[in-house]
Image: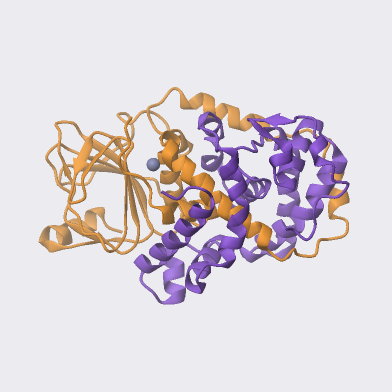
Amino acid sequence: MQEDEPLGGDVKAASTPIINSISSDQLEPWSALLVRLGGERDKAVFAQLFQHFAPRLQAYIMRLGMPRASAEELSQEAMLLVWRKAEMYKPAKARASSWIFTLARNLCIDRMRREKAVECELFEEYMEHDQAEAPEQLLLEDRMQQAIALLPENQAQVLQLCFYEGKSHAEIAQQLAIPLGSVKSRMRLAFDKLKAHWGEAQ
Amino acid sequence: MTIRHHLDDSTLLAYAAGSLPQGMALLVACHLHNCPHCRQTLLQAEAVGGALLQALEPAPLDPQALQAVMARLDQPDTKRSEAGSVAAAARNSDLPVPLQQHLSGDLASLPWRRMGYGMQHIDLKLAGPGTTRLLKIAPGISVPHHTHGGNELTLILRGSYADEIGRFCAGDVADLDDTVQHQPIVDTDQDCICLIATDAPLRFSGLMGRLAQPFIGM
Ligand SMILES: [Zn+2]
């Protein structure tokens, strides 16, 4: 489990017991807390989410190559978005960590291109109509983190270069001095293993 | 729209990570707009991002950071209204919604430029490696045989083409890399309009290809 679970943690007492047919006591604690933030707009709840996610967002943004001052500013921006958009969070679609990661990623793209990252956000409304994941699939997602740790070194490496350093396929190929096709097949192999843990194995 | 050809998992992972060049990300967004199948895969790719975020060693924060953000919670959100106007404009054009950030009007009224060989194009002139362009290919025309120096994404917006891989219709995406050599041919009596994004210049093969390179090429 996480080293720092949400404090004061009667998350089961969240005001909305049933969300898209997943009851909050089935949710991973951070996701339950984010649902509660959307419902109650409680600043103390926000502070808990902030203490957990802001330092990780800052670490993530710095690894993408942002200077420390910008990373601080962007991680604060991202947390402000968490506060503003919490009502739109759908626990049946994604864990809190995935949802917050996506918000931060869009902010970073926005900043790096100095343009709106609208293309990433536009289909939020479509996403709502897509079929929701079954609760047990969501629970299996918990295992993804352990699964990443079990990936062969060369597969974990391409995922980390892609997600942590924002390197494109071509840049990874160049850095590792391997063909483009190998970068892509390593990513596909890694993703297949992770998806299997997500309850998606065919 | 029945979509038969989808994005490669490695492309969706790069999109989820935010590491695709801008033009390829734009094309991916256009396909996702119409494809629940790839949207589902994208959620999984974003879950990989979430798990990797959780796994990061937290960076030490400025001790004032929480206080600074808490002080801003009650301020009004000034950016919120912009997204609505984009969505509203979307309904008056046959361009994919994400593309409307870059072009206005309809497919027919765009400022197409002739490039010979029965092809017309519009270069979106996006920043970053590779190129992003709309291509309009007349019926019966075949694009010169070519391979790719990197990734090449093609999204069909109207009409269809066939190549060594299969038949591609509106909504389909061809997600190719440097291991594939192909020669698409427009196989109906309608123009085929597609959006093409690369992360490196195309390499044409054959005499026709070398002749075409200065026109299509970069
Ligand atoms: Zn698709």
Name which residue lies at 74% across and 41% down: A32
Which residue is more in the foreground, B9 or B23? B9
Q: Which colour scheme is used?
A: by chain
Q: Find residue A60 and report its horizontal and vertical position in percent.
A: 66, 60
Q: Is residue B95 left or right of residue B166?
A: right
Q: In this view, does A125 lie to the left or right of B104?
A: right
In this rendering, the answer to whether A198 lies above or below B192 is: below
Q: Find residue A46 and report its horizontal and vertical position in percent.
A: 81, 43
Q: Which color has been applied to chain B in this rendered view?
A: orange
Name which residue lies at 31% across and 40% down: B172
Which residue is more in the foreground, B5 or B116? B5
Q: Find residue A180 and report its horizontal and vertical position in percent.
A: 37, 67
Q: In this view, does B156 lie to the left or right of A127?
A: left
Asked if residue A112 can be seen in this view, the reply is no
Question: Which quarter is ligand 1 in?
Answer: top left
Q: Find residue A104 and report its horizontal and vertical position in percent.
A: 65, 50
Asked if residue B120 can be seen in this view, the reply is yes
Q: Which color has been applied to chain A in this rendered view?
A: purple
Q: Which residue lies furthest to the bottom in this view?
A: A177
Which residue is more in the foreground, A151 or A169? A151
Q: Which image quadrant: the N terminus of chain A?
A: bottom right
Q: In which quarter of the image is residue B189?
A: top left
